[in-house]
Image (cartoon, rainbow, N blue to C red):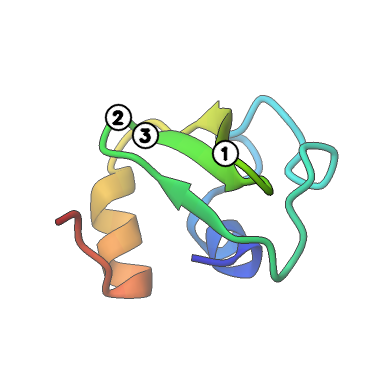
Amino acid sequence: MTGDTLEEIVSDDELHMDLQSAGVEASTIVRVNQHGDIEIRRPHKWDVIGGLLGNFEERIKKTTGYDWA
């Protein structure tokens, strides 16, 4: 998903870091793994930059339509 979509899914009080300071911009490619870790796509790898709590799986599916393979 993009950084814009991630910002729709998370609430400000849920994150213990600022997405922009972690390098997430509107068009940045990010993913959330099945453990709730937010990962940002870097040129040669994925970096974990934070995590989600609660019903993140339901929120992601509802917002994006994406499911884990």
Q: Earlier in the sequence, mark 2 or mark 1?
A: 2
Residue at 52%, 40% (x, y): give it.
39
Q: Quadrant of residue 60?
A: bottom left
What crowding class fits label 2: few (fewer than 14 Cα within 10 Å), some (14-19), or many (20 or more)?
few
Nearer to me, 12 or 69: 69
Q: Spot the residue most to the right.
A: 21
Query: What is the spatial separation of the Cα atoms under label 3 and label 1, in whole angstroms?
Result: 18 Å
Q: Are marks 2 and 3 in contact (CB under 8 Å)?
A: yes
Residue 21 image point, x, y percent: 85, 38
Q: Nearer the viewer, mark 3 or mark 1?
A: 1
Q: Relative to 15, does residue 24 appear above or below in the rendering?
A: below
Label 3 crowd bin: few (<14), some (14–19), many (20+), radius 10 Å: some
Secondary structure type for disc 1: loop
Label 3–label 1 contact, CB within 8 A? no
Which residue is depicted at the point 62% across and 42% down? 44
In the rendered structure, the answer to whether residue 26 lies left or right of residue 3 reads right
Q: Does 31 sit above or below residue 29?
A: above
Q: Where residue 36 is drawn, which disc sits there? A: 3
Q: Quadrant of the C terminus?
A: bottom left
**Residue 3 lies in what quarter of the image?**
bottom right
Indicate left or right for 43 with 38 as reference.
Answer: right
Label number found at residue 20? none
As drawn, the residue found furthest toward the top would be: 16
What's the residue at 32%, 34% (across, down)? 54
* Circle 3: element type: loop
Q: Position of residue 18 (x, y in %)?
A: 77, 37
Q: Nearer the viewer, residue 20 or 12?
A: 20
Disc 1 marks a residue whose amino acid type is Lys
> The disc labelled 2 sits on which kind of residue?
His
Q: Mark 1 — residue?
A: 45
The numbered dot on residue 35 is 2
Q: Locate residue 1, reporting x and y percent.
A: 48, 65
